[in-house]
Amino acid sequence: MSDFKDNLINDTNYFFDGDYETVQGRIIPSVDEVAFGRYGKEVELAMLFIDVKESTKIVDAFRLKTAARMYQSFLRGVTLIALKNDGEVRSFNGDGVLTTFYGDSKCNNAVRSALQMMNFINNILKPKLKSYFINNKQAQNLTFDCGIGIDVGNIFVVRGGAKGDDNNDLVWVGNPTNYAVKLSAQSKVAIKTTLGTDVTTVYNIHITNRVYSNLKPELKTIKSNGLLSVNIWNRQPLVLGAFLPSSLSTTTIYRTNKTLSL
């Protein structure tokens, strides 16, 4: 047996043979604050994940530099909005961004970020990209759009990978991370009309009831005709399938297609 294989076996056994040292975190940790090995920090965080829809088809349709312009603009905009709302971007996953929020206002800051991100995408980024899609035959049936998912709860933060520069990063272990990613994929809903035809309504933002119950009134309602306050969120009928895991079956999901001014 090779020394390399022996090391892989020993490393794997190491993680399973002993308990983890767990530290209760008071802030969002950086990579340098989390040691390698059986060590982790447990922190209550709101997790926001935003994802570009049909990104593979979009990249296939455009030249690499054009696709780079789109992604860099997207990543720059959502990052600045997250930072503006006291969030910290912790992972760029190609066409997706994972952002963490900490503190008493974490749910409100995460939802405000989501509403402002969709404002940026709808009113700044999409108009800029419109001509690129119209003038590209491969992209004429595509549109640049995003889905956002948010959940809140305890996260166990560990350091994964191998020692050395650029070979490791923090891993955000917990249901809130997984649920935020899954919920970001719930963007289009087909609604049956009385005439028997399907009308597709897009809800770009999905949050769990754990997030919704912590929202301030100004992030739940808007003024309609300047008079009545109307709830911008509606409860999603839960349909388990390819996107939502069965563990979400007891969780109420709220969705919206509204935005918030920048």
Image: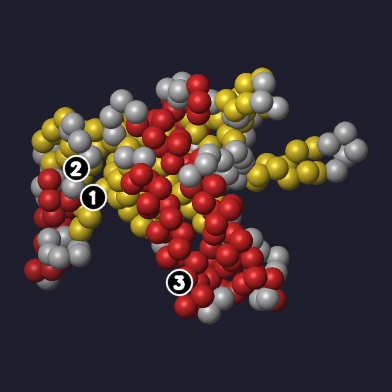
The location of residue 120, given as percent across then percent down, is 52, 51
Find residue 242 and report its image quarter. Answer: top right
The location of residue 80, given as percent across then percent down, is 37, 52
Numbered circle sitting on residue 96 = none
User: CA separation, marks 3 and 2?
Assistant: 30 Å
Amino acid tagged 3: Ala
Q: Element type at marker 3? A: helix
Nearest the viewer among 113 and 256 is 113
User: CA separation, marks 2 and 1?
Assistant: 9 Å
Residue appearing at x 33%, y 53% in the figure: 91
Amino acid tagged 1: Leu
For residue 95, above or below residue 148: below
For residue 182, above or below residue 160: above
Instruction: Tell me the mark number nearer the camera, choosing from 3 and 2.
Output: 3
Q: Element type at marker 2? A: loop
Numbered circle sitting on residue 29 = 2
The location of residue 27, given as percent across then percent down, is 20, 36
Q: Is residue 169 left or right of residue 153?
A: left
Nearest the viewer among 146 and 189 is 146
The local crowd at label 3, few if under 14, some if 14 to 19, many if 20 or more residues have their Cα within 10 Å, is: few
The local crowd at label 2, few if under 14, some if 14 to 19, many if 20 or more residues have their Cα within 10 Å, is: some
For residue 151, above or below residue 84: above
Instruction: Tell me the mark number nearer the camera, choosing from 3 and 1.
Output: 3
The location of residue 144, given as percent across then percent down, is 59, 60
Find residue 25 and report its image quarter. Answer: top left
Amino acid tagged 2: Pro
Residue 78 appears in the rendering: yes
Of labels 2 and 1, earlier in sequence is 2
Name the residue beneath numbered marker 1.
170
The reply to whether dot 2 and dot 1 touch (C-beta < 8 Å) is yes
Of labels 3 and 2, earlier in sequence is 2
